[in-house]
Image (spheres, rainbow, N blue to C red):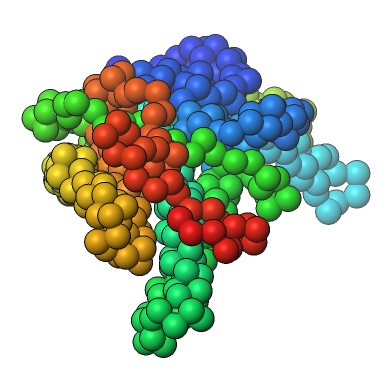
Amino acid sequence: MVPYRHLLPLSAAILAGCAGIPADRGFADVEKLVSARGGPAVSAPDPAADPQALVKDWLSRPLSAEQAVRVAMVRSPKLASGYARLGIAQAEVYDAARLSNPTLSASVLATNEPGGATQLGLGIAQNFAELLLYGPRNRIAQGELERTKAEVAAQIVGFATAVEAAYFEHVGAVQVAQMRELVAGAAGVSARLAQRFFDAGNINRLELRREQAAASAASIELARALAEADETHARLNALMGLADDAAGWTAVARLPAPLAEEDDLAALQALARGQRLDLRAAQQEVALLEAALGITRSYRFLGEAEVGVDYERETDRSRLLGPTLSLQLPLFNSGAGSIERARARLEDSRARLRALEIEASNGVALAHRKVLLARGLLDRYRDEFIPQREEIVQRLQELQNFMIVGQFELLLAKQEEYDAYQAYLETLRDYWVARTELAREVGSRLPSHARVQEPSLDVETLTRPRAGHEGPPPPEPESHEHHHGDTP
């Protein structure tokens, strides 16, 4: 039996369907979901706006991570894709709030006798099943719209973290290339010095070739580092929605220092359960399919049903007017297939939700371990390895001043010191990429994000001589030919 609460008056259906599609397709709600998770400021795409003009000022100066995300929010086609999905969901709500148009029928029947009369018939009918299903259908469409909003917001939050990760990878690649340039410069100085010593007869050919081979290897590593920087630049350029002809921007070649304390894993797990929008969308899908299963069970015997009015004018000029009703009798199909299909879809949705919950829990835990690992390595580089390398250079400089060790040994130590700096910068890059991935797994900004400092670490800062460590200055790049004959 059809529940009485679903028998809505036709007038209520018509009034409910008067509202049109919102101009922003519901994007304001998406903005609120993104903002509540510390995501970037977003707005509905404006076809009339010139995206190049909007980002021109940002691209004219070195980009920070936040500015790179802002550019992506304005330029990336991925945002327009989500906006289109909202439009589809809003159209479904619009259609669900309206009844289908009534069916008009007409007939004209004439006899084949001369002067015979003509019979005229008119009828209008409306799908009665739609009246019964109006409320459930509208609720399902509204629920699907809310689920789509959550999915689009999750896409924006995830995309913003992907841009941040690509930014840190690019800045790290730029810093590595800068450090490899210093190493290549030091190796070049050593090779040129070896050539002078060989020409003077102070070293043999084997020693010369060793220094030259080391310089060649350093030059090759520099070429690889420059290629990696160019590749990460292109990846970030694509994520920001920029074409190759708009790739003239640069990034701030500095990374923030690591935080003094990381977030607690249990707190992050709880935050992920409440903040991940993909989990919310999956939960909403389960709720919608549960409602759909209930509706299918309630209306399992309801087939095609139409109510209407027929008017006929008979051949004798008499008129007939009255209501009509047509029903589909459930003699051969009791709706068991529809119920089983709805039940199976619900079971599939519940299983996918549970799998997503497990994936989210493990993803947060793994990303958190990566952050802690990178943080531990940074501490060891800072407190152990780099001071050791710096002291080696300092002691060798003292010994070289008294001519106890040679120039080549000092230059090799300096290159190894640069290698230690590079390893620190690479680990710092990995640390910030890992934090970005952790934020993506949690589904929002990390609680510790407010403690992030201004960019503070770059190649120049790392290699600047500190008090008590006045080693040799970084060698000139190999392209400076007027320094080729100078000793370090």
Left or right of 126 on screen, residue 257: left
Which residue is at a point 59% across and 15% down the rendered structure image? 18
Which residue is at a point 46% across and 25% down the rendered structure image? 40
Is residue 32 visible from the viewing direction of this image?
Answer: yes
Name the spot of residue 163 as percent of width and height, x first.
Answer: 46, 41
Which residue is at a point 57% across and 63% down the rendered structure image? 485
- Residue 121 falls in image quadrant: top right
| Outermost bottom residue | 205
Name the spot of residue 250 as percent of width and height, x first.
Answer: 59, 41
Q: Nearer the viewer, residue 103 or 246?
A: 246
Q: Nearer the viewer, residue 19 or 367?
A: 367
- Residue 5 falls in image quadrant: top left
| Quadrant in the picture for the N terminus | top left
Which residue is at a point 45% across and 75% down the rendered structure image? 197
The image shows residue 190, relative to residue 129, as above or below, that is below
Q: Nearer the viewer, residue 116 or 376?
A: 376
| Quadrant in the picture for the C terminus | bottom left
Q: Nearer the viewer, residue 438 or 345?
A: 438
Name the spot of residue 192 as percent of width and height, x first.
Answer: 51, 70
Left or right of 144 on screen, residue 28: right
